[in-house]
Amino acid sequence: MIGKGLSLDQAPPFMAPFSFFITAPIFAVFAGFVLLVSDSSLFFHRLSPEFLAVVHLITIGYFSMVMIGSMQQMLPVLAGVQFDSPMRNAKIILFLTSAGATLFFFGFYFSQAIVINIATIFLFAGLFVFIFVVLKALLKVKNKNDSVRAMSYAVISFLVAIICGAYVGFSYGGISEYSDFFASFHIAWVFFGWAMLLVIGVSFQVIPMFYVSSPYPEILRFKGVLTIFAILIALTILRVFGLFDYFYFHKLLEVVMLGIFVIFAYITIKKIKERKRAVVDTSLLFWYVAMSSLIVGIFVWIYGSIAANEQIITLSGIIIAVGFLLSLINGMLYKIVPFLVWFHLSNMGYFDAPTMRDILNDKRARYQLYFHLISFLFFVLALLFNLVLFKIAGLFFIISNILLFINLFICAKVYFKTKSQPLPKMNFDMSAFMKK
Amino acid sequence: MAFEEVIVDTRELESPEPMQRVIDSLGKINDKTYLKMIHRMEPRMLFGILKKNGFEFIVDFKDGSLVSVYIFKEGNNKIKEHIKGIL
């Protein structure tokens, strides 16, 4: 292959993914504030409107926001795809999803049907634009590697999830009839499809790249990912044809899928432990917390399902959402954002740009990790002992995410400050190489 | 004509040090000298930087799980032919 790599113009501008990354902690602070000031008994059940309102601040405002930003950044690199007008699309998607997530919260929390309907329209529109842009770009990719394949399945899953989600949203707004059917599809396709397949696909790249590990086993990279997607489709078909409750086959499929997640988490921990460089940074600790929480969360969920205990099932949700997903995304941000700053500066010719360690002070990130862990602990304690502890969890969650916001903001400051300075003298005669 | 190959082995470096090492070594490239970067994955993000700054590259995947990237001055067809010859 001769010179057929990524062209400079394919990489999206710094602000395209970063605007999503910096928005995420703002929504998290919002969610923490709601937990702090609300009557904790409102969160008694995982399907209560108030609980759903807060959960969607996190799932849309935090998780999806970062995932959308990451995909915009990673797909041009991994697949060589070029997004049309990346900055314009980023602004449209960011506006629609931010407005949608905010309205969604107020609609649910204050039981305002019309606000829920407007929020659903905003959210569906914003996320659909994102999915359309990504799928259009992915269709042009001829040789999809393992990460790109996993991301493709994730985006298709997201499409199914938002269609089901919009139906459920409109049912809360009084337009359609509530359907447990669509609600369960929405949850399954969001978590198992969109979140898990994306996390797994991104890990295939990020772990060997940032932690100098060997690649994930081929069986997981290819068959594992395909099996997860196929099981999701099979479970949906069983449900659509009313076979779900009559056979234990769906239980077997669920166990296989959860088994793949546990294997993925175990392999990731093993890869990190066996990495060639023994340096321990904060992002690495976030990965450990995330993967351990995924394993524990799955076993807690299995126990809760067998015991038919709603409290334990909700606890597994908290362990997976806060311990696994939030920790993992947090850890990834601490690698991706400093890397983006360094990369864009180098790309512009600032070859003496600060290193990643200079861009992000690991000590500051470590303090944030501690607050994150304390909030996680109180989330678990709240569910086990007293819902009032949600207030303490909310307080530490706010502090943790304010610190995350500051840490990311400082990274961006380094970018803009360096960019405003004149280009340094090169150690090679660049002018002789430049095209006239 | 003899050409000099400067090896930049980045197999055990974490991102973005491999790119940084290559950028730091670009000054060694001249009419008779090229870089051979040995890495564990395809350094796609480096390619844009190279192209923008007047370098060409040839990527070789033949060595099992390793990737070799040969980097030389843009338009240096003699080195290009030499590299193609050794691959």
Image (cartoon, coloured by chain):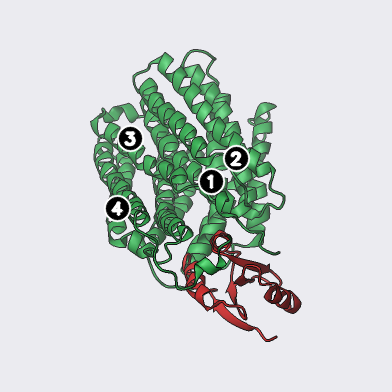
Chain colours: A green, B red
Q: Secondary structure at mark 4?
A: helix
Q: Nearer the viewer, mark 1 or mark 4?
A: 1
As measured in the structure, the alpha-carbon distance from the residue carrying label 4 to the one carrying label 2 is 32 Å
Instruction: Give the residue pinned by disc 4.
Output: A368
Q: How many residues crowd around disc 2 within 10 Å: few (fewer than 14), some, or many (20 or more)? A: many
Does A40 appear above or below A153?
A: above
Give the camera-side residue of A379 and A400.
A400
Residue A436 falls in image quadrant: bottom right
One can see residue A234 in this view: yes
Q: Quickly name the residue at label 2.
A: A134
Chain containing the residue with disc 3: A
Q: Are marks 4 and 2 on the same chain?
A: yes
The residue lying at 43 percent from left, 65 percent from top is A351
Residue occupying the far front of the picture = A436
The picture places residue A283, in percent across and down from the top left corner, at: 39, 58
Task: Give whichever of discs 1 and 4 has the lower sequence position.
Answer: 1
Chain ID, mark 1? A
Where does residue A200 sit, x and y in percent of width and height?
55, 52
- The label on residue B64 is none
Look at label 3 and name its amino acid: Ala
Q: Residue A391, how many percent across, how many down?
A: 25, 37
Amino acid beneath label 4: Gln
Is the residue under label 1 in contact with that under label 2 (CB below 8 Å)? yes
Give, as a three-letter code, the residue at label 2: Val
Question: Are the numbered discs 1 and 4 placed on the same chain, yes or no?
Answer: yes
State left or right for residue B23 relative to residue A181.
left
Q: Which residue is mark 3?
A: A31
Whole-angstrom CA distance, mark 2 to mark 3, is: 29 Å
Residue nearest the observer in this picture, A23 or A433:
A433
Q: Secondary structure at mark 1?
A: helix
Camera-near label (4 vs 2) is: 2
The residue labelled by disc 1 is A71
